[in-house]
């Protein structure tokens, strides 16, 4: 499925779950987008850029372990207009990483910490949920996918919302980090 543009927030400050003009199209949440589009769209404040840097560092930690095949679902207040909805910046970014583990994959020592939710949230500002796709029977993978979709397709107040999907490959990560640095440089007063 090709990448599509990140939809604008709807009147509730949320990504729409689908296009109301084309309600049966496959162009719907989770929207497949480029990592660069996420950075350019959501890197609008120092707090958001700090979270994005943590997200990119988290991705780099996964890449160092050889986890490069798969995709990530991105959600939470980070993908909402939370500054307007709740008058606060986002605290973190919610991420489910669906990946294929390489042959002989056995992380040890500090590498294991990339799978510890508390450590990842503290170090990277990522509320992380890893799912090893090739380690699960098909039925369980479908169950996990349905679980995360149902968890992320609405807010706690039951407002329906969309979320994003980015490729796990490290293709755009260096350029995304450059964009963040450029955003910071552009905000420095002359």
Image (tube, rainbow, N blue to C red):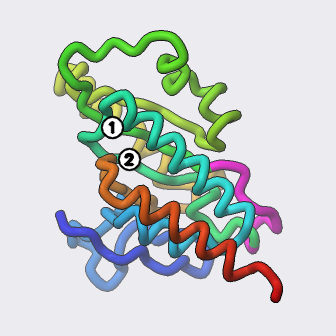
Q: Quadrant of the C terminus?
A: bottom right
Q: Position of residue 36 (x, y in %)?
A: 42, 68
Spatial CA span between label 2 and label 1: 6 Å
Q: Position of residue 170 (x, y in %)?
A: 33, 50
Whichever of callouts 2 and 1 sits on the residue coming sooner in the sequence is 2
Q: Residue furthest bottom?
A: 190
Q: Is residue 132 left or right of residue 15?
A: left
- The image's mark for residue 98 is 1
Q: Is residue 142 above or below residue 113?
A: below
SS at mark 2 in the image: strand
**Image mark count:** 2
- Given residues 120 and 131, the one toward you in this image is 120
Q: Are marks 2 and 1 in contact (CB under 8 Å)?
A: yes
- Kindly identify the residue that appears in the image at 65 percent across and 26 percent down: 118
- Kindly identify the residue that appears in the image at 52 percent across and 71 percent down: 179
Q: Is residue 123 above or below residue 92?
A: above
Q: Position of residue 116 (x, y in %)?
A: 56, 22
- The image's mark for residue 128 is none
Q: Which residue is mark 2?
A: 72
- The answer to which quarter of the image holds residue 96 is top left
Q: Quadrant of the N terminus?
A: bottom left
Q: Position of residue 122 (x, y in %)?
A: 70, 34
Q: Is residue 32 left or right of residue 185?
A: left
Magenta stretch in the rendered image: 84-92
Asked whether 25 falls inside the magenta stretch, the response is no
Q: Main secondary structure of the magenta part?
A: loop
């Amino acid at each position: 499925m090709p990448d599509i543009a990140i939809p604008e927030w709807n009147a509730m400050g949320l990504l729409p779950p689908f296009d109301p003009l084309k309600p049966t199209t496959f162009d719907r949440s989770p929207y497949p987008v480029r990592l660069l589009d996420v950075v350019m769209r959501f890197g609008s404040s120092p707090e958001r850029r700090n979270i994005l840097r943590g997200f990119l560092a988290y991705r780099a930690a996964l890449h160092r372990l050889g986890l490069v095949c798969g995709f990530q679902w991105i959600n939470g207040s980070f993908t909402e207009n939370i500054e307007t909805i709740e008058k606060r910046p986002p605290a973190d970014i919610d991420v489910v990483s669906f990946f294929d583990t390489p042959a002989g994959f056995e992380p040890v020592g500090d590498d294991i910490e990339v799978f510890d939710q508390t450590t990842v949230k503290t170090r990277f500002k990522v509320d992380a949920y890893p799912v090893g796709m090739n380690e699960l029977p098909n039925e369980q993978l479908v169950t996990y996918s349905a679980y995360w979709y149902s968890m992320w397709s609405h807010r706690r107040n039951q407002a329906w919302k969309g979320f994003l999907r980015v490729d796990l490959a490290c293709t755009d990560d260096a350029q995304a980090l450059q964009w963040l640095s450029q955003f910071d440089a552009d905000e420095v007063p002359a």
